[in-house]
Structures are given as C-alpha cells and as structure tokens.
Image (cartoon, helix red, strand yellow):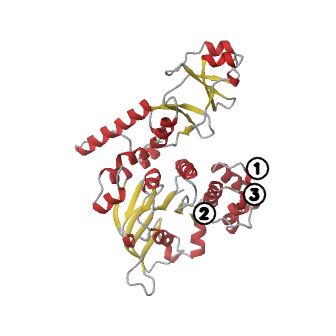
Amino acid sequence: MSARIELENLSKRYPGSPSPAVDDVSMEIRPGETVVLVGPSGCGKSTTLRMINRLIEPSSGRIRIDGEDVTRIDPVRLRREVGYAIQSSGLFPHMTVAENIALVPRMLGWSRARVRERVEEMLVLVGLDPGEFHGRYPRRLSGGQQQRVGVARALAADPPVLLMDEPFGAVDPITRDHLQDELVRLQRELRKTIVFVTHDLDEAIRLGDRIAVLRERSRIAQFDTPEAILTGPADDFVSGFVGAGAALKRLNLTRLRDVRIGAFPTVSVDDPRRTVLGRPADGPHGELLVLDRHRRPRAWLRRGDLARAEGFPARAGRAVRTTVTRDATLRDALEAVLLDPAGRVAVTGRRGEYAGVVDMGTLMAAVHGMLEADRAAAAGRPREGRPHRAERERGA
C-alpha cells in the first residue's frame, strides 16, 4: 500500500522572520517511490517534511495525499495514518519494544491478538528476534537496534506513507550502512511512498529513486534521479553540492543484486576428506569455500589446510571475516574486496546464506557497463544499462 503525495506552492513563514523558512515549493512524489530531500543545513528540508503530517502547519499552499487535502484532515488522525521515523529513534523509554511498536495500532482500536501478531511480524521484518527483543526497554538496545525498532513502530499500522527525518544520523558509519541496506530491502518488499531527509548526498544516492537538491528556503535546485544529478548537475550550486568524486559516488547507484555474481566451489563442514579432495578448487590459491550447516560462509580452505586439520573442513581454513549482502552497493563491495588478502568477498542473502562471490573482475565489468550507458546517454541514444531503481522494482 502506497500513496501519491503532491506539494503545491507550499510555504512556511514564522512570526518575526523577514523571509519564509519554506518558499513556494511544488513537488509530486509517485506511489511507491523513495524521494530524498537533501541540502545544506538550515535550508528547510525538515520543515518541508514535517508539514506533510502537519507537525508543522503550513502558512500557505496545499498538501495532498492520494488527492485528499491534508489540511482538511484531523491532524491526530493524519499522524496515525502516516509513518514517522526520526533521528535517535524517538522511542518512549518507559515502554518495552513491543509496547512502542504496538502504540499506533492500539490507538486505532486493533484487537489484542492482531496487535500481538503485528508486533512479532514487524520485529521479524526489521531483523530482530521477537523472543529476544519483545520485552526489552530502549536503554538496553544499541543505537542500530533502536533505529530498527523506530522503523518498525513507524510501519506497524501499515501506513501508505513513511516520513523519515535523518533517521540514521546519530549512529556510527558501519551501523548506518547496514541500516541503509535494510531500508532498501524493506522498501523492495513493502513499496511504501517514502520521503527521506538527509544532509548526506551519499546517503541520498544509496536510497533515493529521485533526489530533490534544495537551496535555501527549500527552493528546488534539481529534482531528478541520482544518475542524472551525478552525470548532469543542473547548475553550479548542484555541482558544488555533488562535489568531487562523482565517479566514485556512482558506485553507490548499483547494488550487487543487479550485477552478475560469480560462483565459487563450496563444501560443507560435514563433508569428508575424500569429497573435499574431489572438488575442483578456484582462485589463484586453489581454494574452496566452506559453508556451515545453514549454508553460511565459514572459511576459505586450501587443500593443504586439510592435513593440519586431520582431514575435516570444519577445523580447517582461514575464517571468513567479512561478507556483503545482495543489497550492498558496488562501493561497499569494492571496500571489502580491497581489504581482503585474496581480493574477493563472499556475498550472502537475507539470512546470511551463501549467494556467490564477487571480485575485482566482477566490479570492473559492472563499472564498464555504467560507463558505456553514460556514453550512450551522452550521445543521445537510449540507455541500455542499469534501469532506474523504481522501474526495476516494479518490473521484478
């Protein structure tokens, strides 16, 4: 369930201020689309977002959700029907995880059984074990876990629209990358209409189907796909905001699920020595990838390692320290490949199961494909490269 959002000549003026905080903004956001508002601090992007659910009342203009003017909707009802996730999660500290997630469904009068089922469903959806986290309080959660619960609470009543105001800004970079990948995965499954505010262009590129680069007072400098903004900034302001390294930023536009991932010979921790010795190896070191009983990558194994481990792969090899998921970007994969001694990294699915291996050759082939697509676009030919994310997901 998703909805169309229309902003029409939207403005916000505060008493005593000589100029508006938001000035005459018009924008249409398509159903199921993730639109990211990005711009310098103080440009009015959060104010624009908060007017959509009337946490801030607009001074003039209109906001429509699926054609309905939100200024004519009771603001309390509106906020119950629009999901909202903020920085530092905004969880109520005196409520358990389950109570936080159940808050809006209970306000909407859902039955206890339905609420209980929904809480468990939401915890699973955001990757948290219901048995472990159901009764915890926010103070007993890490920052990343708190943000996951915050997203679960925002989605609990199944709203068509999700507003996200710098939700990952207060966590460390590694956790932020994981949360961004989780949001991409969730959006692929749920296809909500998401409006996301950030000051970080790299985050906008990773998440957005379209990006609105905002000047002061939320005036739109460019509203386009990440590809178009990186390869064709509308003016000097956008070009300056994109900054140097646009080619590297483009690596955030493609995810591993969109490229061909190589296979690698695997064995199980339970396989006997004769099975392992009979399996063809790969790579410059003649290795096999050992998988555990859940098919998760466990170790890189050379045949010589078997002698030191009495013939059992469960006791041999070099432990797999790093993996990347199918939702990881090419930039994530490049960093992992560069840090690996053998120049490759295992790719995993949602539950950590083995999906393939990516190496520098895979990444170079993908980059060359993007460059060819850029050349075709520059020459006025139809692009045959990576489709726009929203088009790709709709076609899946």
Decide if residue 216 is on the left or right side of residue 32: left
Q: Residues within 10 Å of mark 1 (few under 14, many from 20)?
A: few
Q: Which residue is mark 1?
A: 131
Give how far across and how far down residue 355 sits, in percent: 56, 32
Label 3, label 1: how many angstroms apart (C-alpha)? Answer: 10 Å
Q: Amino acid at mark 2?
A: Ser
Q: Amino acid at mark 3?
A: Arg
Q: Which residue is mark 2?
A: 88
Q: Residue at x 71, y 22 (%)?
A: 270
Q: Residue at x 31, y 57 (%)?
A: 239
The circle on residue 136 is: 3
Give how far across and how far down residue 326 sits, in percent: 53, 39
Mark 2 or 3, closer to the camera: 2
Q: Is residue 180 visible?
A: yes
Q: Amino acid at mark 1?
A: Gly
User: Helix, strand, or loop for circle 3?
Assistant: loop
User: Helix, strand, or loop for circle 1?
Assistant: helix
